[in-house]
Amino acid sequence: MAHPISSIAPRAAIVAIAATSLAGCGINSVPTAEEAAKAKWADVQAAFQERANLIPNLAAVAKGAAEQEKGILVGVTEARAKASSIQITADDLKDPAKMKAFQDAQNQLSGALGGFGRLLANTEAYPNLKSIENYQMLQSQLEGQENRIRVAIRDYNAAVQGYNTTIRTFPDAIGAKIFYGAKPMVPYQAVTPGAEVAPSLEGKI
């Protein structure tokens, strides 16, 4: 009669080998990569929200602008409302259409903010703006926030690339398909020329 311990050892070895094989087939790496990308997307959303929170402060700055040019501020506030109305959940990161709608709205807001910055950079029309402390502070905050957005998008895209690579390469692709039905995530694409670079008004005001 075989000793019970002698039969346990082979079984334990088989379990260990099976666990190692499964781990090598994306059981752990696929969800890990996906959660990492989702976390980076949360950073992107937070950065965009912080930018949106700064926009109401433009109303005070706009008091120095000519009445007929206040329409630029209206464009900014309307773009902000549209951008804020489009929310992306973690599940939407694999939906190209929803991601494009979000990107388009944020790019529109970026364009509107750029127009407002160019307006205020006109020192001949608004020479007093340069000395307005609130404007200088707001300018610095907006430029800093645009830079944080750029960094957050870069980090998100790197995480998406890592996830997409994981689910397409052997052996992780096995688990990605069989266990998770994994689909590629959509990277963030700034279609506005230069939108990936933080704007700077230094030397223009």
Image (cartoon, rainbow, N blue to C red):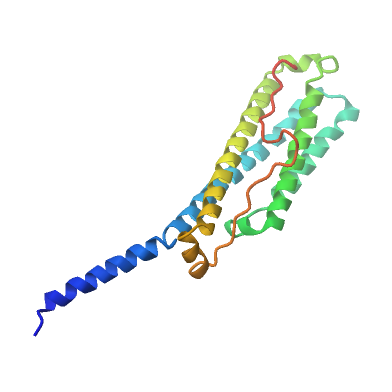
Q: Which residue ends up furthest to the right in the rendered image?
A: 68
Residues 142 and 153: in front is 153
Above or below 124: residue 65:
below
The quarter holding residue 150 reads top right
Above or below 149: residue 91:
below
Residues 145 and 155: in front is 155
Q: Quadrant of the N terminus?
A: bottom left
Residues 186 and 124: in front is 186
Q: Position of residue 92 (x, y in %)?
A: 63, 58
Q: Is residue 181 visible?
A: yes
Q: Is residue 128 left or right of residue 159?
A: right
The quarter holding residue 46 reads top right
Q: Position of residue 196 (x, y in %)?
A: 67, 35
Residue at 72% in and 57% down: 97
Q: Is residue 71 left or right of residue 29?
A: right
Above or below 133: residue 96:
below
Q: How many marks?
A: 0
Q: Position of residue 129 (x, y in %)?
A: 76, 18
Residue at 71% in and 43% down: 106
Above or below 61: residue 183:
below
Residue at 82% in and 19% down: 122
